Image: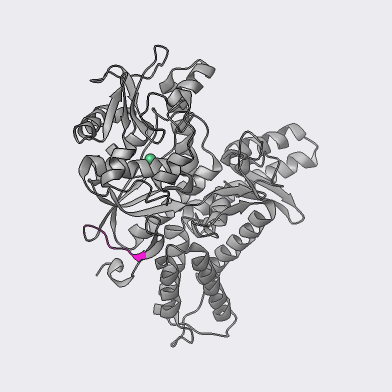
Amino acid sequence: MALYNKQQLRLYNSIDGEKQVFKPIHEGRIGMYVCGPTVYSNVHLGNCRTFISFDMIYRYLSHLGYKVRYVRNITDAGHLTDDADAGEDKISKKARLEQLEPMEVVQQYTLDFHNVMKRFNCHPPSIEPTATGHIVEQIEIIKTILDKGYAYERNGSIYFDVLKFNEDHHYGKLSGRNLEDMIANTRELASQSEKENAQDFALWKKASPEHIMRWPSPWGDGFPGWHLECTVMSSKYLGETFDIHGGGMDLKFPHHECEIAQGEAAHGHSPVNYWLHANMLTLEGKKMSKSTGNSILPEELFTGDNDFMEKPFSPAVIRFFMMQAHYRSILDFSNDAILAAEKGLHRLQEGIKVLQQLPASKESSVDINKWVQDCYNAMNDDFNTPILIAELFEGVKIIHAIKDGNETITAADLKLLEEKMTAFLIDVLGIENNIAAATTGASKHIDAAMKLIIDLRATARARKDWETSDKIRDELAAAGIQLKDGADGTTFTTN
Ligand SMILES: [Zn+2]
C-alpha cells in the first residue's frame, strides 16, 4: 500500500483561504505547475525561496509515493517591465542594454538559474517549457477566447475582456478583489487607451517596429501577453484542470487571477484545484530590493562576499534555514538567524552520525512509531517543516538518551529511526548530509586528500611561503572548498 493511503495530507488552498484534505484528480498521480523565473537577470534570493519551497513540496509528494509531473516554465518572452501591459519586454531591454541577442540573455540567465537551483539541491522539474517554444499554442488559445467572446482586437493587439468575463464568471476570486472596486480605483493611463477598460489585459501585443522579439500571427507581428504562457503550458502538459498550481505570493494578482480567467474563458471550467503560494523573504526586516541595495545574490551568500553576513554559508545551511520557517510565513534573513540554523543543522547531522553507532537491545523503551507518525503529522499539516524540524531534534534527543544508556532500542526500531531521520532530512527537506556522505569510501579518500593538502599548506606557511599557501586556499575556494583556520588547526567545508 502506498504511503499516501496511510497519510492524510491537508494543504492550504489560497483560493478558498482554508486547509483542505488533498485529493488528486487521478489516484496516485499529481500534476503540479509552478511559475518559473523570467530569465533577464541573476535569480533573486526571494525567488530561490519560492522554488526551494516547491522543491520541498515536490519531494514530500514523491516521498508519499505519488507520481508527480512537475512543470515549471521559463519565461523568455512577453514579460513587460510594467504590469499594466506597458513598458518594454524585460529580456529585450536587457539585450538592448548589453548589446546581446535576446536569446543570449535567456541562455545566460537560464544557466545561472539552473546552477543556483543545483547548488540548493533542488530537483529539476519533469518538464521545463519556455514561452517562445509555445507561440503556436498561445495563438490557438487566443483564437478560442476570441471565438467565445471574451476578448477583442484593437490595432493588432488582443485584449481579454474582463467585464464581459465577469458577467458569467468571477474575476478576482483568488486575490479576493472585487471588480467594481478595482474599476473605482483605477486611473486610466494614456498608454492604455486602446483597452476598453483598464482591467483588461493583453493576450497578444502588436510589436512596434523596434521590438525585436516578434512572431507572425493572424493579427500581425507581435508577441504574447505574459499571463498566457502559463495557461497554455499548464493545460498542454497537465490537462485543462490539474491538481496544484504554485508560485510566489506576489503572483496572486494579476498573474494568477488572469490565468484563472483565461483558463475558464477557453475551457469553461476552473484550471486548478489547489492554489499554493509561498511567502516572501526579507533582509534584516526590510523587503529585498536591488534598487535600495537591500539585496544579496545566492552566490554572494556562498562566498561571503556581501555586506550583511559575517561569513560564508553553504547552500545546505541556507536551505535548512529556509525550511525552519513555514513556506507561507514571511522569513527574515539575518546573520544571527543563519548562524543559529548552522548550529542546529550540525546538531542534527552529529545526531545522525551517533545514530549509526548505537547498540541494539532486546526491547525498546522509546516509542519510535509514535515519533515517526509525529513527523508525518507535521508534513501532512500543509507541509509544516518547522514542526518537522522540531520533531527531528526530538529524534536527536532520543539518540543521545540511547547512547547515554538512559533508553534502549531494538534493532528493528533502530533501523526505522535511522531510515526516517535520513528520509526526512535528506529526501524531504533536501538537505545534503555531509556526515552521511563521510561514511562512504569515496569521502574517506577525499578526507585523506584534504588532510594532505592542509598539511602541505601548513608547511608552506611555516616557511613563510605565502604565495603557495594563498594559491592553495584560493584555488580550493574557487572549487567550492573553504579552509578555516581555527585554534584546533585547519578544517574545511564545502559549498
Ligand atoms: Zn505563471
Q: Choose between 161 and 235: the one closer to the eye.
A: 161
When the figure is inspected, residue 158 is found, relative to residue 48, above or below; the finding is above
Q: Magenta part mainly helix, strand or loop?
A: loop
Task: Name the residue at 62% across, 57% down.
Answer: 342
The chosen color scheme is one colour
How far across and down, in percent of the image, does residue 446 sit? 54, 48
Q: Left or right: where does residue 454 sit relative to residue 131? A: right
Task: Name the residue at 48% across, 45% down.
Answer: 250
Ligand 1 is found in the corner quadrant, namely top left
* Image quarter of residue 367: bottom left
Q: Left or right: where does residue 263 sit relative to residue 480? A: left
Q: Is residue 112 in the magenta section?
A: no
How far across and down, in percent of the image, does residue 489 sit? 73, 53
How far across and down, in percent of the image, does residue 309 sit? 69, 46
Q: Is residue 121 visible?
A: no
Q: Left or right: where does residue 280 sit relative to residue 334? A: left
Task: Name the residue at 64% across, 49% down.
Answer: 492
Q: Choose between 86 and 140: the one closer to the eye.
A: 86
Q: Quadrant of the N terminus?
A: bottom left
Task: Name the residue at 54% across, 39% down.
Answer: 44
When the figure is inspected, residue 420 is found, relative to residue 101, above or below; the finding is below
How far across and down, in percent of the image, does residue 356 sit? 50, 69
The span picked out in magenta is 20-26
Q: Choose between 67 and 449: the one closer to the eye.
A: 67
* Image quarter of residue 179: top left
